[in-house]
Amino acid sequence: MKKRKMYSATALAATTAVLVGVTGVSAEQTLFTDVPANHPYGEPITALAALGVVNGFGDGTFKPDAAVTRGQAAKMIAGAFQLNNPAVENLQFTDVAKTSPYYSAILALVSLGVITGYEDQTFRPAENLTHGHIKVIIERVSAAYPVDAAALFTLANVAFDEKKNITRGELASILTEALKLVEENSKYFNLSVMHVNDTHGRVDVFPKLMTAVKEQRAKTPDALLLHAGDAFSGTLYFNEFEGKADLPFLNAMNFDAMVFGNHEFDLGSSPEGHKALADFVKAAKFPFISANTDFSKDSLFTGLFTDLISSEPENGKIYSGMIKEINGEKVGIFGLTTSETKDISSPGSVVFEDYIEEANKAVKAFEDKGVNKIIALTHIGYDDNVAYDNDQMLAKSVPGIDIIVGGHTHTELKEPVVVNTNTVGEKKDATLIVQAYQYSDYLGTLNVAFDENGVVVNHKGQLIKVGELAEDPEGVKLLAPYKAKVDATEKAEIGVTLTQELANPRSSETSPVSVRNSETALGNIITDGMLAKAKKSTDKKVVMALQNGGGIRAAINEGPITTGEVITVLPFGNTLALADVTGAELKATFEHAVKDAPKESGGFLHISGAKFEYDSTKNAGSRVVSLKYFDEATNSYVDIQDNQTYTIATNAFTAKGGDGFADLKAAYAAGRVTDLGLSDWENLKEQFISLKEIPYELQGRIVDVAATK
């Protein structure tokens, strides 16, 4: 790809010179008869006109109060930012001829993805633009520099009104302020980062992710592309190919580095151990980094792993960290993997060391090499259990880290979080934390300006919604053979046959029974599988399992069960989580679950290992009559006690407070939730296979005593 500089340094310098009066155009002079010296936008109009960025009309006027058209705006913006060298040769708009005075400007802006046309292949250059339109355009055109488009309106003395047409004078003032900021930022080193995390085998999304990456690279060709871990586990693509379906895409997108997530170690207890992970590393056309992960005792990684920071990292190798040179500046990147991996995955002989200690070592190693711009690529979680590790504590505890690109908690940080105090509340240089949710739903973007000391002085970050983009044609071709295999597997029978339907009822005129207000056989089977898997996955005493009714999405028809049917029942890719809660919190959780009963609620809870009675005639918040769990020691159901702490199993969505479960949300915030990372549909499939006979009948686990009165 041919690199192009979006902004001309010469133009920026000239613009600044004009604005301070060096060009000889004084504030008292007027170039246009309708723009007097005291006009609120007189100075920026005069400055841009002297540069040739804006022009007046044949009658000597500028018409500063006239609305800006799409064509005029394109010419002003392209001229101000010196945008040229377009990536496409011709415009396809039926209403913009090559002879149009706006043709080259529109071509440049379309090439950069700054503006688009309409579905009928028109551009409509004579249409007016609003304040809202210009805000979006400035955000896109300034992608190479951290420019706050909203702040520009204030600086330009323009009262922002999203739907109001923008005038020629207002746009001139906004462009002038934008150029001032760009010129100021040009004194700094500007770094761009793209990032994803917790992609979890969503290979079918990668063609759209490829489009997102290509569009961003068109704007910032030198941007880093980082993966914050957990490519493994979660879909049939992983079950079938164990990471081999991901690699063609990750390699094609030219990732710069990846850190190991806990799920990368899920196959450690298999007969082949971590062979799939070692093969994944070897075939990658990028290096892996993790400063606190020791592979030395696993022979599968011999020759792949070195506990060093490399200035010349090799593809398919593992390092503590690496140094990348970008536009003449050195950037240090090191990795961290959660120590929780030993409890929620199968790392075997792979050891995870203290993340704070190893982070301090990595920062010192970079600084000893003269590197003062440092990125931590982490899979420890934004707000995960502090007893293990998390990004906020890392930012407060380790000086010298400028950016933390994170994963593990699937957190949607719509803009960077700034941490500028240490663990005792003292001021420190800013550390930016970013995370892009999950499953390649978003491509995270971050643009940062550093001063000569490597201190963050400005930044801008956002999440690009991948699902709204078109699929990259190359990606579609890469996906085809893997998709064919997965489609066939979805249709494959799991070896279990139903003699009657496992219903997923909803309320109707003929029946009030719903998966969202009543016990169901399917809900019982799901939660039985959750409880069984949870008990196998922890040494804790797990007393019950909970599944929100809103998460059960389909019935399973009579006849052979297919893998695809199982996935359709639980399609959201949820994982199994454990939560430590008090009896009082657990009762409050069940109060919330039945607050709308007998009306339907997505938060209605199906249960295993417990019995629950409530009275729907009572006021919400006072409906729980009885809540008991089955105590294996006494072979009987025992009342939940308010002041005791219990471990329960549920899906990660519910464990984090989804469906309004405030007490579970508080437990998650307090670090009392552990995501085991086990796929819900896979657990259900295993449960079906384990059953000697299907329990079609209800078991009285959930009873509304109002119905028995």
Image (spheres, rainbow, N blue to C red):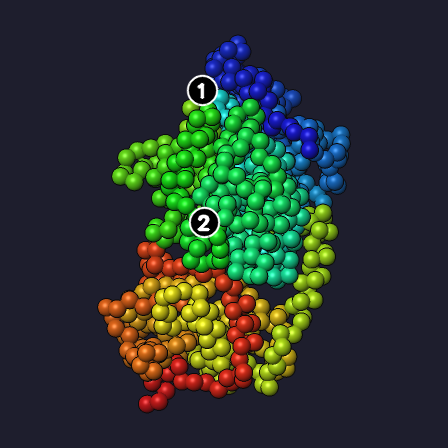
Distance of label 2 from label 1 (alpha carbons)? 70 Å
Q: Which residue is mark 2?
A: 351
Picture quadrant of residue 590 = bottom left
Q: Are marks 2 and 1 in contact (CB under 8 Å)?
A: no
Residue shown at 65% from the left, 68% from the top: 490
Mark 2: which secondary structure? strand
Q: Nearer the viewer, mark 2 or mark 1?
A: 2
Above or below for 417 versus 400: below
Q: Quick one: SS at disc 1?
A: loop
Q: Residues within 10 Å of mark 2 (few under 14, many from 20)?
A: some
- The amino acid on which the numbered mark 1 sits, given as a three-letter code, is Asn
Q: Position of residue 48 (x, y in %)?
A: 56, 21
Left or right: residue 112 compared with residue 605: right
Kind of residue indicated by mark 2: Val
- Seen at 69% across and 33% down, the residue is 1
Kindly identify which residue carries mark 1: 38
Where residue 585 sits: x, y (%)?
A: 30, 67
Q: Position of residue 394 (x, y in %)?
A: 38, 42
The tag on residue 405 is: none
Residue 139 can be seen, yes or no? no
